[in-house]
Image: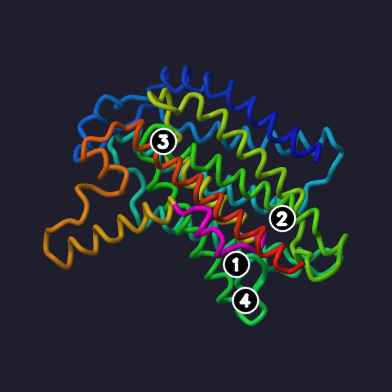
Amino acid sequence: MRAILFGGGLALLISLLGTRVAINLFTQWGYGQEIRDDGPTSHHTKRGTPTMGGVVIILATVIGYFAANVITQSRPSASALLLLFLFVGMGAVGFLDDYIKISKQRSLGLRSKAKMIGQTVIALVFGALALSPWLEDANGRTPASEKISFLREIDWLALPMVLAVILIWLIITATSNAVNLTDGLDGLATGACVMVFGAYMLVNIWQSNQFCQDNPGPLCYNVRDPLDLAVVAAAITGACFGFLWWNASPAAIFMGDTGSLSLGAALAGFAILTRTELLLIILGGLFLVETLSVMLQVGYFKVTRGKRIFRMAPLHHHFEMLGWEQVTVVIRFWIITGLCVAAGLGVFYAEWVARL
């Protein structure tokens, strides 16, 4: 438990102080955000605001995690290292996207195919390693499972390894892009991620307390390395908290695709490694709604040849176009995230109580 406190606290401190340094450096280097011409006009004042702040979140998380392990003299687990690989790897894809935007002075970075190739490579490598027998622990547990899960593994929903890797790829790419779509207003995605990663920290702590290796029985959780995953979750939560100080309206820096793609992938990684894949739909309800709004808008536009459901997608821009202040949209969407997280944790705990 000390590692959780150290990891979260150090990551928060590094992010809080490091983001201030990044703002100064990125401003000097001209790493400013480009704004869509077809977006809300209120966003045009944000042109030139430093971006790629996700670099600070990633560095703060990695340093916080490894420092906590050194302080507590703990060895990094296979599950935590895999999650950090996914987190940093997807952040690298986002970094390339952000850098191209800056260097080419345009609002679009990597081509969609190139971005998808990068995401696919990282997700498939993660999936193959997470299911690999090479990473089994002494009790034969691999970091991920070939069974589909909600609150635990569903025994009758076991998949062949190839299909399981494909499912992992789908969850990772979908979630990383969902957080990327949500990152459109000052502090919106960052604040939402604080709550969802905080929820996964609690899930991991609970799973550690009811770990099958220590407390075998019908109530235990058959997962690998839950306590070490809780340290990673605490580090990401702390890093996002520190970054939110500077990212809240009016934002002094944006996380960019570097941050949104990496955070989305990490959320998917937690869902996969904690055997709570379908629970992510509840915990990350806001990200799901934002993604569905884009899908509905694009589909309806094509079917009706030009008509729209929303004034603009993703959904947060629709409410902006209706005249809501940005701060109002962000706070109300944070409230929705809080309700989703409360519902998800409630379902998770209720299932355990029902087994008593």
Crowd rating for badge 2 (residues with CA inside 10 Å; few <14, some 14–19, many 20+): many
Q: Contact (CB < 8 A) between labels 3 and 4? A: no
Q: Mark 2 points at which residue?
A: 79
Q: Earlier in the sequence, mark 2 or mark 1?
A: 2
Crowd rating for badge 4 (residues with CA inside 10 Å; few <14, some 14–19, many 20+): some
Q: Contact (CB < 8 A) between labels 4 and 2? A: no
Q: Which amino acid does label 2 sit on?
A: Ser
Residue under the point 87% across and 38% down: 73
Q: Mark 3 points at which residue?
A: 331
Q: Name the residue under label 1.
A: 150
Q: Does residue 49 appear in this view?
A: yes
* Camera-side mark, 2 or 1: 1
Please state which of residues 219 and 138 is positioned toward the viewer in this rendering. Answer: 219
Please state which of residues 195 and 108 is positioned toward the viewer in this rendering. Answer: 195
Crowd rating for badge 1 (residues with CA inside 10 Å; few <14, some 14–19, many 20+): some
Residue under the point 41% across and 53% down: 115
Q: What residue type is labelled 3?
A: Ile
x and y percent of residue 79 in the render? 71, 55
Q: What stretch is highlighted in magenta?
A: 273-285
Residue under the point 34% across and 43% down: 109
Q: Earlier in the sequence, mark 1 or mark 4?
A: 1
Q: Name the residue under label 4.
A: 161
Find numbered disc 4 in the image and state the secondary structure of the residue it sits on.
Answer: helix
Q: Is 268 drawn above or below residue 56 in the view shown?
A: below
Q: Is 15 drawn above or below residue 207 in the view shown?
A: above
Q: Distance between the residues labelled 2 and 1?
A: 19 Å
Q: What residue type is labelled 4?
A: Met
Q: Contact (CB < 8 A) between labels 2 and 1? A: no
Quadrant the N terminus occupies: top right
